[in-house]
Amino acid sequence: VARYNDSEKDGKVNPFAWEDQQIRKATLSFGSKNKNQSEEAKAYDYVFDDQDEVVRADIKGGVDGNEEANQKKRLKSVVKSAYERLLEDRKSLPIYPEKERLLKAIEDNQILVIVAETGSGKTTQIPQYLHEAGYTKHGKIGVTQPRRVAAMSVAARVSREMGVKLGQQVGYSIRFEDRSCEKTVIKYMTDGMLLREILGEPDLASYTVVMVDEAHERSLSTDIVFSLVKDIAKVRPDLKVLISSATMDAQKFSEYFDSAPIIDIPGRRFPVEIHYTEAPEADYMDAAIVRALQIHVTEPQGDGDILIFFTGQEEIETAEEFLKQRTRGFGSKIPELIICPIYANLPTELQAKIFQPTPDGARKVVLATNIAETSLTIDGIKYVIDPGFVKLKSYNPRTGMESLQITAISKASANQRAGRSGRTGPGKCYRLYTEDYYLNDLCDNTVPEIQRTNLANVALSLKSLGIDDLVEFDFMDPPSSQALLKALELLFALNALNKFGELTKLGRQMAEFPLDPMLSKMIVASNIYKCSEEIVSIAAMLSVGGSIFYRPKNKKVHADNAHQNFHVGNVGDHIAMLNVYNGWKETEFSTQWCYDNFIQERSMKRARDIRDQLKGIMERLDIELTSNLGDLGAIKKAITAGYFPNSAKFQMDRSYRTIKNAQTVYIHPSSGLAEVLPRYVVYNELVDTSKEYMRQVSEIKREWLVEIAPHYYQLKDVEDLASRKMPRGEGLSSKH
Ligand code: CDP
Ligand code: MG
């Protein structure tokens, strides 16, 4: 399993030209159909802000000879015909005949649990029905999604269905990206963003309806939102709360919301033939590829598409590569196989590709993460290949250490996955495991995220909402008291809480940032070290999500040489990121500079954007922006002020040991310090692949730990036991 994970994320990223290539290829491979699609996209962008009713309005304009007016008229008519086509689609959804019954139930009840098969139209239709029924006259409809990609893509879809421009009446809000405005009445957002909205508006006064969608996913923020909206509903009798879920757990939701009624929308589900393997598969990647090709070649041409579930971007890219290699020699006898990847960090332009209809005769193979299990419905899937794994967070409340791990799925997941093949006709699901394994080894349900994650972030949010007693908080499934305690301990160590468990001024400032507490502490603390300009750049670079360094297969040496410039002096990964940001900034954010230095421009633009937003929060909090670029020590001290709980000490066998818990960890091979091996380091995160790896590492001095966190570290904790045999000479030969 470890072969296909994130271990080399920075090393194996796509070339910057790659995305453009993909977009071009996608356009070409869809031929004329796709031309209409991009024409359509242009048309939607063209719809003017005030064109609320554009599709119903007369299409005026277009005096001959007036190029612009003609163009406008043409684009409007494109929107209108797309609108009419989509209207037909909408009417064919299982939820459509239930519209009146649904609206009546919502009118009669304040809280309602809505259950329907995935793909019935819950997410896209219910908000529109409510809008048409007048629920947006005095406020907004907020719809939460556990996944950012789902929030974005559903908002885009609904804006098209309504014939309006995305970001106007229909918008979305995800962390660091708000595409909504004061006109927005249907707002899709991640559940985490609703949590932040509640921080700013504790009674959600601007909302008339909150729909907690994908409730069965039981993401951490969804679970917290449950409890908060349950309370808000008590003080806001006019607020409607809808809990919508795939066909799972409905009874449990109803009980939690004081026996709220359940409305069950009958879905269409065709029979699905389940196939198991005879024996366990040694290599599920290979087995999945072979199976997909077999389906493509042996099943009737053009009878349906294939969906394969992988655990993450890395695996999906590997699979894409394999599929391309193996279909290269197919020639013209075998119909085209169109490869469509979908995962959280996929560039927005490419996300749309999975929804485009498959051209006649061809077959689509969608390579997806768990996102396609219930969040996104892709029409036309007839074959599902399920290797049986998912990447999940896991947390050890004893040590407080969190990491991502590839884990077996639950029976409930396996059944949802299989169901994706029987939406439009009878389907087939190939499970790459044995029936015995399914029956005896898989758990019934996935453990809710709240029971396998670090709770510091949530605890800080709840504290700043004035919820003091977290043990008494109304959790649907409470986390262990040990995990809660660990979270409070961390917040106390960061000085966000005082010894009475009350939020400090610092804690209040930290809660303003949509970031993990250690990261926000680093920003707030930078004030003391007079290096907030530098720290906010580092924080932004750390929050980008995608990779920054680009290392194409055929130019690894060139790329490494270019990247080495940012690491000169073995400054560590944080300062290297700062060097990248400043280097780019000095050239006025030049594209050519990114090219020359093998840096992902897309990530840099995102970093700049995030940086602006963080700066805005700092200004609001009166955190002065000062630069102290000459003093790398001060910058590293500020980093340590946030990340001191993640400190580790070098051991003689090239491993490290975390100072607080004595866990064995290693510097990630992609780190600039991987060969330098300083005595003391702090790191940003751990990833558990073949080993527990520290990612984003900086060297620190041990005295800093005692100086910065005297309540957390004593001198004896940091005593330099390994000092007698430090491989200093060997250590200085850096990879970079
Ligand atoms: O929420 P639920 O799973 O019940 O269904 P939905 O997401 O509202 O999807 C209803 C229909 O809209 C499906 O048939 C999807 O194919 C379509 N849809 C789409 O084409 N593009 C999207 N981004 C989302 C949905
Ligand atoms: Mg949905």
Image (spheres, rainbow, N blue to C red):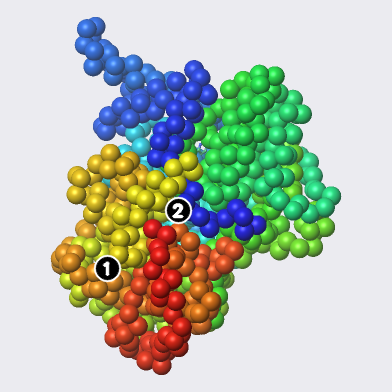
Query: Is residue 703 at all visible to an observer of this figure?
Result: yes
Task: Indicate left or right for 657 with 536 as reference.
Answer: right
Tell me the CA gap for discs 2 and 1: 25 Å
Residue type indicated by callout 1 = Ile
Query: Which residue is more in the foreground, 200 or 713?
Result: 713
Task: Indicate left or right for 46 with 132 as reference.
Answer: left
Farthest front residue in view: 729
**Residue at figure coordinates x 35%, y 89% from the top left:** 711
- Residue 221 point in image, percent of width and height: 46, 62
First along the sequence among labels 2 and 1: 2
Q: Which residue is mark 2?
A: 10
Query: Which residue is more in the foreground, 735 or 183?
Result: 735
Classify mark 1: residues with Cα within 10 Å, few (<14), some (14-19) or many (20+): many
Q: Which quadrant of the figure contains the C terminus?
A: bottom left
Classify mark 2: residues with Cα within 10 Å, few (<14), some (14-19) or many (20+): some
Farthest top residue in view: 64
**Residue at figure coordinates x 41%, y 73% from the top left:** 729
Query: Which residue is more in the foreground, 125 or 66?
Result: 66
Q: Which mark is residue 523?
A: 1
Query: Which residue is more in the foreground, 172 or 718?
Result: 718
- The number of numbered badges drawn on the structure is 2
- Residue 15 point in image, percent of width and height: 43, 41
- Residue 332 point in image, percent of width and height: 66, 19
Q: Which mark is residue 353?
A: none
Residue 633, quarter of the rendered image: bottom left
SS state under label 1 = helix
Location of residue 331 with respect to 275 vertically, above or below: above
- Residue 663 point in image, percent of width and height: 53, 79
